[in-house]
Amino acid sequence: MTSFTNKVVVITGGNSGIGLATAQAFAKDGAKVVIFGRDRESLRNAAETLGANASAIQGDVTKAADLDALIAHVKKTHGRIDTLFVNAGVAEFRPVDLADEAHFDKLFDINVKGAYYTVQKALPLMGQGSSIVFTTSGAQELGMAGASVYGATKAALRSFARTLSADLKDRGIRVNAVSPGPVQTPIFGRMGLSHEQIEGFSKEIAGQVPMGRVGQASEIAAAVKFLASDGAAYITGASLPVDGGMTTL
Ligand code: NAD
């Protein structure tokens, strides 16, 4: 596997869950990691665990000025981006009758628009041999009740991985997606569910996974590292399911 020593890796949502585990995996391999997220305290704590080569920028992917500040920081500190992990996202589930405009706009603003402009603004720092990985979800493939809006946001990202691959292939930039199944992260606690409901949800969803368990964030991180590595040099426009067989069996 490629050495990531001194590679510059930018991770949105790098202060929690899958993003943080991925930041840790890259930092362990010597990468210079820049994490971006909304919550100041968890960003500070995350940056501390990542060590001297890491830095953290607070911001919101739906705000153009915050993305500009992230890119300006990366340009000034490192001058380039080798891997962009477009991972920030929120999950909320509503049956169609209860999916009001606020729910729809929130999910599309963060998960889709935020992701698209993260890429657009990062591109001037990306060159030959660099790559982009989106975090999508098994919800883009499955007909999960209550996931009409969330699943559509992730299907949009899956589409970006294809279309942006075509846009960027002549610049030597690969674009792929990692598609997690259910993974134990703080995201379950942000859905407005009680502790008991989260336990019940985790158990129920684990029962739907052919491998019989939810995933670990480190297992998604390993797939992201592979997609960013030279070992994946001939892979672009792909979506890699890391879901215990949930969408593949
Ligand atoms: P998490 O809640 O631990 O992390 C989400 C991250 O996104 C946080 O760091 C948060 O700061 C960031 N974020 C959210 N809104 C933001 C905004 N407006 N601006 C900037 N940052 C923002 O959850 P996670 O499970 O690690 O989720 C990471 C990604 O994985 C998400 O895109 C999620 O949809 C996807 N995913 C998660 C699972 C799962 O079961 N955990 C499954 C499939 C896909």
Image (cartoon, rainbow, N blue to C red):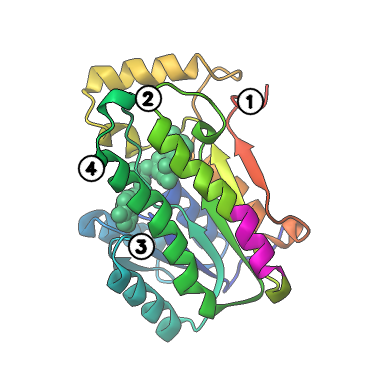
Q: In the image, residue 41 lies at what x, y percent?
A: 21, 56
User: Magenta span has 178?
Assistant: no
- Which label's residue is closer to the chain start, 3 or 1? 3
Is disc 2 in contact with disc 1, using a CB cutoff of under 8 Å? Answer: no
Determine if residue 143 is in view.
yes
- Which label's residue is closer to the chain start, 2 or 4? 4
Q: In the image, residue 83 lies at what x, y percent?
A: 56, 65
Q: In the image, residue 190 lies at what x, y percent?
A: 26, 36
Q: Mark 2 points at which residue?
A: 146
- Closer to the eye: label 2 or 1: 2
Q: Mark 4 points at which residue?
A: 102
- Which label's residue is closer to the chain start, 3 or 4? 3
At label 3, the amino acid type is Phe
At label 4, the amino acid type is Ala
Q: Residues within 10 Å of mark 1 (few under 14, many from 20)?
A: some
- Residue name at image x 35 percent, y 76 percent: 68
Q: Residues within 10 Å of mark 3 (few under 14, many from 20)?
A: many
Q: How far apart are marks 2 and 3 (CA)?
A: 29 Å
Residue 36: image tag: 3
Q: Main secondary structure of the magenta part?
A: helix
Tag 2 secondary structure? loop
Q: Does the residue labelled 3 lie within 8 Å of ligand 1?
A: yes
Q: How far apart are marks 3 and 1 (CA)?
A: 30 Å
Q: Distance between the residues labelled 2 and 4?
A: 16 Å
Q: Name the residue under label 1.
A: 245
Q: Which residue lies furthest to the right in this view?
A: 234
Residues in magenta, as a range:
161-169
Determine if residue 16 is in view.
no
Q: Does the residue labelled 2 lie within 8 Å of ligand 1?
A: no
